[in-house]
């Protein structure tokens, strides 16, 4: 049994979820079981998820029921917020449950605190209650000092320049 740590990838730069996908591929190669929670993301739209779904024996991907990104004009904000809360409750159930995962990833999980969907203390309690051999990985745009204190690894992604700023849309196989 190896020790599990808490990793955080945050910032407004590109690559947080892609870094997590690379980490998941390493987990698969060693037979580790991964629970991936995709907050604020639409089901089956990322290329990473399409590949990872081929490894269902090692990776389980969870999405919110609203299947809508944050601030979608087509979905009421209350429905999005409730859906994200329920997904977090599912993550807690997985953490405390009988089914064993070696790695639990809350992709955009830090943004639950940023948008006040859950309290900082709820996320801290989630981190603190992890079994010693479980790795927790959190991504998002924002982190506060209280949460950072509980991390073993923190990586900051900062955008210096991006072609999105020139109106370039997300491209298949590159951004999604």
Image: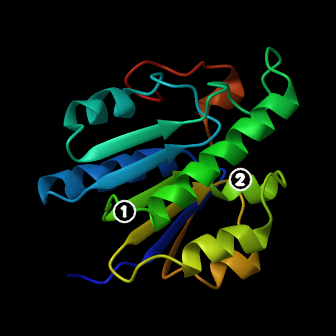
Q: Nearer the viewer, residue 60 or 51?
A: 60
Q: Nearer the viewer, residue 147 or 34?
A: 34
Q: Which numbered dot is residue 98?
A: 1
155 vs 28: above or below: below
Query: Which quadrant is home to the N terminus?
Result: bottom left
Residue 159 showing in the rendered view: no
- Return the x and y of residue 71 as percentages of the image width and height: 81, 30
Furthest toward the left, the residue is: 30
Given residues 170 and 25, the one toward you in this image is 25
For residue 62, the mark is none
Who's the residue at 32% across and 60% down the image?
101
Q: As displayed, is residue 146 above or below residue 102?
A: below
Q: Which residue is mark 2?
A: 111
Crowding near pointer 1: few (<14 within 10 Å), some, many (20+)? few
Please tell me in which quadrant of the rendered image residue 170 appears. Answer: top right
17 sits to left or right of 58: right
Does 2 sit left or right of 141 as displayed? left
Circle 2 or circle 1, nearest the eye: 1
Instruction: Using the image, determine if residue 48 lies above or below residue 131.
Output: above
Q: Residue at x 61, y 20 (%)?
A: 168
Q: Residues within 10 Å of mark 2 (few under 14, many from 20)?
A: many
Q: Position of residue 3 (x, y in %)?
A: 31, 84
Q: Answer yes or no: is residue 170 visible.
A: yes
Residue 83 drawn above or below residue 47: below
Helix, strand or loop for disc 2: helix
């Amino acid at each position: 049994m190896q020790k599990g740590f808490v990793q955080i990838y945050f910032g407004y730069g590109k690559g947080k979820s892609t870094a997590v996908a690379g980490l998941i591929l390493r987990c698969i190669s060693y037979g580790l079981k991964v629970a991936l929670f995709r907050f604020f993301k639409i089901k089956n739209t990322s290329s990473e998820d399409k590949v990872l779904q081929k490894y269902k024996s090692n990776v389980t991907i969870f999405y919110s029921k609203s299947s809508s990104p944050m601030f979608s004009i087509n979905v009421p904000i209350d429905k999005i917020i409730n859906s994200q809360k329920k997904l977090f409750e599912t993550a807690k159930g997985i953490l405390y449950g009988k089914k064993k995962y070696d790695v639990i990833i809350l992709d955009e999980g830090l943004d639950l605190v940023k948008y006040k969907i859950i309290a900082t203390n709820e996320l801290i309690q989630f981190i603190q209650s992890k079994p010693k051999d479980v790795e927790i990985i959190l991504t998002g745009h924002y982190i506060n000092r209280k949460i950072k204190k509980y991390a073993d690894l923190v990586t900051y992604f900062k955008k210096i320049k991006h072609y999105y700023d020139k109106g370039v849309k997300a491209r298949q196989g590159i951004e999604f």
